Image (tube, coloured by chain):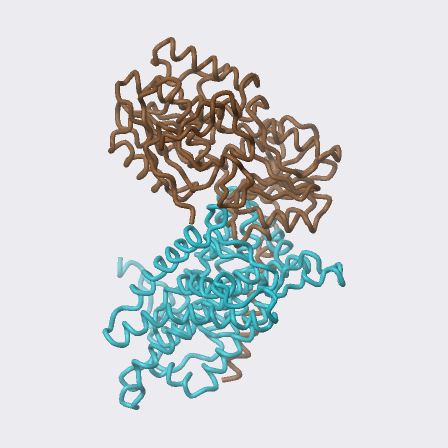
Chain colours: A brown, B cyan
């Protein structure tokens, strides 16, 4: 008996040794080594041609995030795949922007990082390797980012998005997407009015201030172009679930919605839209490809990140609570850009509405309008109460707070605009 | 045409040598690595680079060894959980759910709260560990009871209970204990954390960021306990007998129903302990997706380790290393592929245990074309 155990122990120790051997099989036979040398040569020659984002440890098509000597090293930690067509891809697009537009930087990413289980180890591992800036782009990375930042004072860690910062090297970053939701609301309202069906839908993720704020911004935009339109809401309790998102979209279309807007990742509303109905997608600029798609309300993190990387390199980054508005170029509406064409469903909106939409959009981009203009009175909630009187604007803490969650907001974001025909989510 | 030698495959009539299972497992793992290297090469990767990276990312420094062992900790416990059940040929596919229930029950200590954060730490941790094991044991009891009393297939019930456990957890973290509307509870106070080496970084600065926690020691002790049960206790002998030959066990007067329930509960308790160790040692709050499928990886580990508790430790460290190194290789997915190939190879290698394979010189003279 004990003999057998000894054997298995010994053998399994060998298994561990075989971990080393995993690199050995190719190291022993000479021809294999030659091949790998040539395999390494080829991409090196091609490297100048394909400029975007090459990480330094070149394992062929596979990449392992490592730092590069003499460059400023920037790492990104993603919750999903880098090409998810939504939230994460928008960040990866920004990573490429940083790689190509900031002098002497090197970027790398780690994708599909589990929020509770792996995040801390992954972020710490990047900090150990000597990355100078780490962007962690999911809410669930917040605690892990905070802990690692406290261990590595020389590494700046930027978390998108949550509610923690340490005033030094750990900061929180988010932008005022409500501006784009507002203009998208104007598009949706104009479209529904032209189609003669005043029903709209909103796929909301979690009952948090952000989702009510974005829904209300959409509703306020709808009011501008279609005062008689109403909006129904579906809660899905996830940021990314292609199946659930599609079910929610179909459910809204089935109950009569003409246009569905989403707060989640995938282009589900455009994909689920039957002929003659419309969807509005979120997060990633180029996920509005379906002909049923009106526009995508997209993030353009690139310039924002490039700015932070510069600050960090000059030793000027202070980890606080940063909330950028649309005049930074950090967001946009697909189809309205200079070298973009309007999607067919938008191009066919009556001229006067379209002109007003374009004008409002330009005002947001130039900074003439900002998020406080979106939430300026008079605003009435769907119970008939006057939430914001004429001539008054909500304050920042009102935009992002629930009293129930300990915010010091006066007019908290716990209301639905008058054209939203849904009940408030319960908070207890 | 005929070859000068025949491949003779015969069912083994006598016991195979004692070293054979370990040797075939080892060969299977090596073969899996070689196959993976070839696949990597075919898709344009560089196996040498990846291999070197694997080593440095997992055992290259004290810090990475710590990362690897932290990953191995829950794997050892779920691997043991599956081994215990499989030893009696109970197919517990529910370690994932038992893990979640363990995490949930351990959280009750914090969130009800059963004990305040300034209670004596050993008491808190003991209470959380016991609650975790109770949670897992309950989730093992249900399919065990159904199997023992009504012969309901435990494969189906344990599998389905995984989803129930995850959704049960979701209800509490979304609805009752949600922090700020998000799918997680509040951060546990430090009093509820398993001690980790990084806690002593103030006195010993080199320990900064070394997150190996007490759960690893608990996992090692659990392996010793399971070994003792299997190899030293009467109960372990009964379990094996029931698994190998239930009829003989029945004639011998063993209470099979009772043992099914007990073994399922022990299996669940071990997986529940893994859940407690993860939330108290790593995540520090109850939230969604605390397990990247540890429970299912445990099944693979139990098989690769051939149900030997000490082998479970080594295989878990190997799989922990696979996860730690694999997740850094972009695009992701390499680690999962390797795991799959290893399992496939190990299960295939069982053929060598059941059949003897040898080459035999053909005795009849070879006449070319006669068989064509």
- A207 in relation to A358, above or below: below
Q: Position of residue B178 (x, y in %)?
A: 46, 51
Where's the C terminus of chain B, which quadrant? Answer: bottom left
Q: Nearer the viewer, residue A142 or B246?
A: A142
Q: Position of residue B362 (x, y in %)?
A: 35, 70
Q: Position of residue A88 (x, y in %)?
A: 50, 37
Location of residue A96 (image quadrant): top right
Is there any visible trace of residue A13 in the rendered image?
A: yes
Residue drawn at 67 percent across, 63 percent down:
B197
Q: Is residue A341 left or right of residue A364?
A: left
- Quadrant where the N terminus of chain B sits is bottom left
**Residue extending furthest toward the top:** A351
Left or right, B362 with reference to B286: left
Foreground: B205 or A402? A402
Looking at the picture, tell me which residue is in the foreground, A173 or A40. Answer: A173
Query: In this picture, is B170 found above or below A204?
Result: below
In this orientation, which residue lies closer to the viewer: B187 or A12?
A: B187
């Amino acid at each position: 008996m004990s003999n057998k155990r000894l054997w298995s122990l010994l053998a399994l120790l060998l298994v561990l040794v075989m971990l080393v051997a995993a690199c050995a099989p190719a190291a022993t036979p000479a021809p294999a080594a030659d091949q790998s040398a040539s395999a390494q040569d080829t991409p090196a020659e091609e490297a100048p041609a394909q400029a975007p984002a090459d990480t330094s440890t070149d394992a062929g098509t596979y990449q392992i995030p490592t730092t590069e000597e003499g460059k400023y090293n920037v790492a990104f930690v993603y919750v999903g795949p880098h090409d998810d067509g939504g939230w994460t891809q928008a960040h990866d697009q920004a990573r490429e922007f940083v790689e190509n537009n900031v002098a002497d930087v090197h970027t790398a990413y780690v994708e599909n990082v589990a929020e509770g289980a792996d995040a801390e180890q992954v972020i710490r591992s990047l900090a150990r390797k000597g990355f100078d800036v780490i962007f962690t782009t999911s809410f669930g990375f917040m605690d892990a980012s905070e802990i690692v930042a406290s261990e590595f004072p020389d590494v700046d860690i930027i978390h998108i998005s949550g509610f923690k910062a340490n005033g030094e090297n750990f900061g929180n970053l988010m932008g005022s997407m409500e501006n784009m939701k507002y203009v998208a609301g104007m598009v949706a309202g104009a479209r529904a009015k032209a189609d003669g069906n005043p029903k709209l839908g909103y796929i909301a993720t979690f009952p948090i201030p952000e989702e009510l704020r974005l829904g209300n911004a959409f509703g306020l935009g709808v009011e501008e172009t279609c005062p008689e339109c109403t909006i129904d809401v579906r809660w899905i309790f996830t940021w990314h679930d292609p199946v659930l998102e599609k079910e929610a979209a179909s459910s809204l279309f089935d109950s009569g919605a003409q246009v569905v807007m989403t707060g989640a990742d995938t282009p589900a509303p455009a994909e689920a839209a039957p002929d003659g109905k419309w969807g509005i997608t979120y997060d990633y600029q180029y996920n509005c490809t379906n002909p049923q798609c009106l526009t995508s309300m997209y993030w353009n993190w690139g310039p924002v990140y490039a700015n932070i990387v510069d600050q960090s390199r000059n030793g000027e980054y202070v980890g606080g609570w940063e909330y950028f508005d649309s005049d930074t170029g950090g967001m946009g509406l697909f189809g309205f850009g200079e070298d973009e064409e309007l999607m067919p469903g938008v191009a066919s909106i009556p001229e006067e509405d379209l002109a007003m939409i374009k004008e409002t959009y330009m005002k947001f981009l130039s900074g003439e309008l900002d998020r406080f203009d979106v939430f300026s009175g008079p605003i009435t909630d769907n119970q008939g109460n006057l939430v914001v009187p004429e001539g008054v604007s909500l304050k920042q803490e009102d935009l992002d707070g629930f009293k129930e969650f300990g915010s010091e907001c006066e007019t908290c974001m716990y209301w639905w605009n008058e054209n939203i025909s849904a009940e408030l989510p319960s908070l207890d | 045409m005929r070859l000068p030698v025949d491949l003779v495959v015969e069912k083994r009539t006598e016991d195979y040598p004692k070293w054979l299972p370990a040797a075939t497992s080892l060969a299977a793992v090596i073969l899996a690595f070689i196959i993976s290297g070839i696949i990597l090469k075919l898709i344009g990767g560089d196996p040498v680079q990846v291999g070197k990276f694997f080593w440095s990312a997992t055992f290259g420094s004290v810090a990475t060894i710590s990362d690897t062992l932290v990953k191995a900790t829950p794997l050892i416990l779920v691997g043991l959980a599956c081994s215990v059940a499989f030893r009696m040929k109970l197919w517990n596919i529910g370690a994932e759910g038992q893990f979640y229930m363990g995490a949930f029950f351990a959280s009750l200590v914090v969130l009800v709260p059963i004990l305040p954060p300034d209670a004596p730490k050993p008491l808190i941790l003991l209470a959380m560990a016991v609650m975790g094991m109770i949670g897992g044991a309950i989730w093992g009891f249900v399919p065990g009871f159904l199997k023992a009393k009504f012969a309901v297939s435990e494969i189906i019930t344990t599998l389905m209970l995984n989803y129930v456990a995850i959704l049960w957890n979701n209800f509490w973290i979304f609805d009752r204990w949600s922090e700020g509307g998000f799918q997680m509870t509040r951060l546990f106070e430090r009093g509820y954390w398993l001690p980790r080496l990084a806690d002593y970084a103030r006195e010993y600065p080199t320990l900064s960021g070394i997150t190996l926690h007490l759960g690893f020691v608990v996992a090692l002790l659990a392996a010793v306990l399971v070994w003792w049960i299997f190899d030293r206790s009467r109960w372990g002998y009964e379990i094996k007998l029931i698994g190998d030959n239930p009829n003989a066990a029945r004639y011998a007067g063993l209470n099979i129903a009772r043992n099914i329930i007990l073994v399922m509960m022990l299996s669940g308790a071990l997986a529940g302990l893994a859940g407690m160790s993860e939330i108290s040692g790593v995540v520090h709050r109850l939230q969604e997706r605390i397990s990247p499928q540890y429970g299912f990886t445990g099944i693979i580990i139990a098989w690769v380790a051939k149900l030997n508790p000490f082998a479970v430790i080594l295989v878990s460290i190997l799989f922990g290393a696979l996860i730690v190194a694999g997740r850094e290789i972009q695009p992701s997915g390499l680690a999962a592929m390797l795991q799959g190939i290893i399992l496939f190879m190990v299960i295939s290698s069982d053929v060598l245990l059941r059949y003897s394979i040898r080459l035999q010189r053909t005795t009849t003279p070879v006449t070319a074309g006669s068989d064509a």
